[in-house]
Structure formats: C-alpha cells, structure tokens
Image: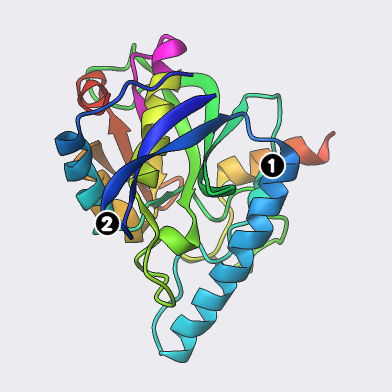
Amino acid sequence: MNVPKLSHAKLLRLVEQENNASVTAGNPRRFFKKKPAPDSSAQSGVTSRTKKAFASANSK
Amino acid sequence: MSSIQIRDRRIGEFVEAELVSDLSTDELTRTEHTYRELRERRAADAIAEGAPPPQHSEWDWTLKASGDDGGSYRYFGIRREGLIQGLIMLNAAPQQSRSPGHEDDQILYVEFIETAPWNQNTYARTSPRYGGIGIALLRAAIQTSREAGCGGRIGLHSLPQSEGFYRPNFQDLGVDPAEDLRYFEMSEEQALRLL
C-alpha cells in the first residue's frame, strides 16, 4: 500500500493535534473474554455487538 | 515495503517508518506483551497518584485477534527501530455511513487504534519518542477505504480521553447509545485533506 506523502507543514500541524490528545479508539468492552459484572456502567458491561462477537467466536 | 512519515520527537524531525500491512499473529502477540507491561505500569502509577488509569488499560490485542471472525479484520502497524509504534484494527467489510444525507455511502470501520505506550504523553516515565503515529495509522485506514471503493470514509468510536483528537478531523455524530461512546465519521472531503 502506498500512502501519499504530505507536506511537512501539513503533517506538523496534524502531529501537534495528536500530541495534545491520546489516540485511542474502540470499545474496550468488546472482544473481552471476561464477563463483566451485571451492574454495567460506562466503564463496564457488554454491548450487543460484543455479545455477537462472543457468540460468533464460541461457535467456531 | 511501504513507508510512511512519522516525527521523531527526540530530534524534532520527520523520519521514514515502515507501514506493515496485515501484521502477523506472532508480531501482534509480541507487541501486545510489550504494550501490556507498560499499560499495567502506567495504570498502577495513576492509581498510586489517585488519578484514573487510562481508559484503554485493559485492552488486549491478542484477545481482539482471537475474536476475529470471517477474515474481515485487517491489522496494520507502524514499525520503526524494530518495534511496532502503533496498531490499528480495521474492519475491511464496508458498512453503511451514519452521516445524515450520506446513508447510501459506505465506510470502513476502525475497530481499535492505539499508539505504543512510550509514544503517549500520558505515559509519564519517559518522554514520548515518536509523534504522528495515530495520524499515520489513520492515513493508512483512509487509503484502504479508498482502495475498497469507500472514498476514504472511515468511522470509529472514540474513548472519551481521545475525543479531542478526533473532533477536528471527523464529524462528531454524538454518543452512540449502543456503545456508550461518541461516534466519529470522516467524510470523503475530510479524508482527502489528510492524504
């Protein structure tokens, strides 16, 4: 794969944006093997998509 | 070998790094072991300081890989100095855009993205080595989206700690109640600005 090169000025602006914030995305509840506590909150719980992923993985 | 530019923050210059497409399971596992030790140390430091640990402290890329189903996931890494400096897991099966007025368009969904702990500002034990890893990984995702006929459009759910990074370059489509996370989508126009 060839990703086009950016000008250093443009790239520098983007890098500075990134320096000011962590770059993480993705739901941490997904793909986990451990079943979270039933009293789910913003930091724990299982989403419907996670359940589907588990069901699919377990059916293999 | 594909190369991509990242910034060496120790010398303040851009350098070439290797863009690894379809990372092997072995390298993914080795990378996870390296990241995990540092993530756990960072989380312990935060707790000792009375601060909340990073929101991705419990991530495990090997579990993500084991949950892979149907072969639609692709893993990309940025390699420099023999180490993977950041990882992205992309669902290569196109999905419907959630952007109002663009429901007929398709996107590629970013399942997970993480820069190496030693490149994050939040990892306080050392100064960050490389910058622009996240941007480089997103640019690889945009290019993959273009090659898949999705026009560079990508979507993702950001952790709250990272929303400030995505907001300038994506459309903020609000909190997705199904995931309890804010959903961001990059339009074709926004994608072109990053290529």
Q: List x then y, in percent, for residue A30.
A: 59, 49
The front one of B48 and A7 is A7
SS state under label 1 = helix
| Rendered residue at 37%/25% (across/down) | B142
Q: Is residue A1 above or below residue A19?
A: above
| Rendered residue at 40%/32% (across/down) | B4
Disc 1: CA contacts within 10 A as few (<14), some (14-19) or many (>=20): some
Q: Is residue B47 above or below residue B162?
A: below
Q: Quadrant location of the C terminus of chain B?
A: top left
Q: List x then y, in percent, for residue B46.
A: 44, 82
Question: Residue B188 falls in which quadrant of the image?
Answer: top left
Given the current orientation, which residue lies at the most extreme front position? Answer: B11
The disc label shown at residue B21, or none: none
Left or right: B181, with A59 as reference point: left
Q: List x then y, in percent, for residue B155.
A: 38, 32
Magenta region: B145-154
Confirm whether circles 2 and 1 share one chain.
no
Figure coloring: rainbow
Magenta stretch encompasses residue B116:
no
Query: Badge 2 sits on which subunit?
Result: A
Q: Is residue A52 above or below residue B92?
A: below
Magenta stretch encompasses residue B147:
yes
Left or right: B111, with B121 as reference point: right
Q: Circle 1 sits on which residue?
A: B65
